[in-house]
């Protein structure tokens, strides 16, 4: 009889271990794999087109913002500083103005503040929808060289942390 109890106890332990393994695998499959950036085409204010495929091989930010967003305006000098710190062959930055932002306001702000990065008008909201239906500004995506979304930042960025993440992504050779 003692042997039967040990056997039942062992089966119970195996079932618990199996349940934990299944839970861990499910969690990894849901949250552990990096999500890839959607295949989109940006129409820059200059009229040029840029696709996420064109940006492969670079680390880049896609930053959704609006001229009516106080937090966006507050953090814009730090966005410029971050761009200037990392700009070059392996880093890029695309600022996407929300569909409700009047194009004239965006153009005036871009010129007055000499925004050095690429500016896109999402006039119909399609880009915001493709990037997980962005509703809140600012929303910033950090994307690695392989087109994987490393981070989604809602609200004002923690710039020392963002810059640390960019440095890490730039130095990652995978």
Image (cartoon, grey):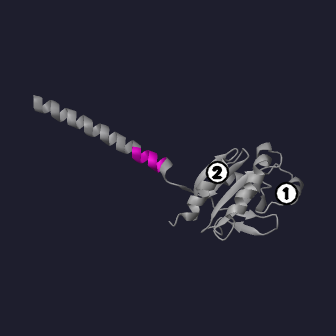
Decide which of 6, 57 is in the foreground and name it: 57
Residue farthest along the top direction in this orientation: 1
* Residue 54 rendering spot, x and y as whole percentages: 66, 69
Q: How many neighbours does mark 2 have within 10 angstroms: few (below 14), some (14-19), or many (20 or more)? A: few
* Residue 89 rendering spot, x and y as whole percentages: 66, 71
Closer to the chain start, of discs 2 and 1, is 1
> In the displayed structure, would residue 4 be above or below residue 46?
above
Q: Is residue 112 visible?
A: yes
Q: Is residue 93 visible?
A: no
Residue at image point 80% right, 55% down:
123
Residue occupied by mark 1? 113
Residue at image point 61% right, 50% down:
161
Q: Which mark is residue 79?
A: none
Q: Main secondary structure of the magenta part?
A: helix
* Residue 174 rendering spot, x and y as whole percentages: 50, 65
Instruction: Give, as a single range, the part of the protein colored magenta.
Output: 24-30
Inter-mark Cα distance, 2 to 1 = 22 Å
Residue 70 appears in which quarter of the rendering? Answer: top right
Residue occupied by mark 2? 160
> In the displayed structure, would residue 163 be above or below residue 69?
below
Left-right relation of 160 to 68: left
Decide which of 31, 169 is in the foreground and name it: 169
Decide which of 168, 51 is in the foreground and name it: 168
* Residue 110 rendering spot, x and y as whole percentages: 84, 58
Of helix, strand and loop, which one carries label 2? Answer: helix
Of helix, strand and loop, which one carries label 1? Answer: loop
Residue mark closest to the camera, 2 vs 1: 2
Which corner quadrant holds the N terminus? top left
Residue 143 appears in which quarter of the rendering? Answer: bottom right
Residue 147 appears in which quarter of the rendering? Answer: bottom right
């Amino acid at each position: 009889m003692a042997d039967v109890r040990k056997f039942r106890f062992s089966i119970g332990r195996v079932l618990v271990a199996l349940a934990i393994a299944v839970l861990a695998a499910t969690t990894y499959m849901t949250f552990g794999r990096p999500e890839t950036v959607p295949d989109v085409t940006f129409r820059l204010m200059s009229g040029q087109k840029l696709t996420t495929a064109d940006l492969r091989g670079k680390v880049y930010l896609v930053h959704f913002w609006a001229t009516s967003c106080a937090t966006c305006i507050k953090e814009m000098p730090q966005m410029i500083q971050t761009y200037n710190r990392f700009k070059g062959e392996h880093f890029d930055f695309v600022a996407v103005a929300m569909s409700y932002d009047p194009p004239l306001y965006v153009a005036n702000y871009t010129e007055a503040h000499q925004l050095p990065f690429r500016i896109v008008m999402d006039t119909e909201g399609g880009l915001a929808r493709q990037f997980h239906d962005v509703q809140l500004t600012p929303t910033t995506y950090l994307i690695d060289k392989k087109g994987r979304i490393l981070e989604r930042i809602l609200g004002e960025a923690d710039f020392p942390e963002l810059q640390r993440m960019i440095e890490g992504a730039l130095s990652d050779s995978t």
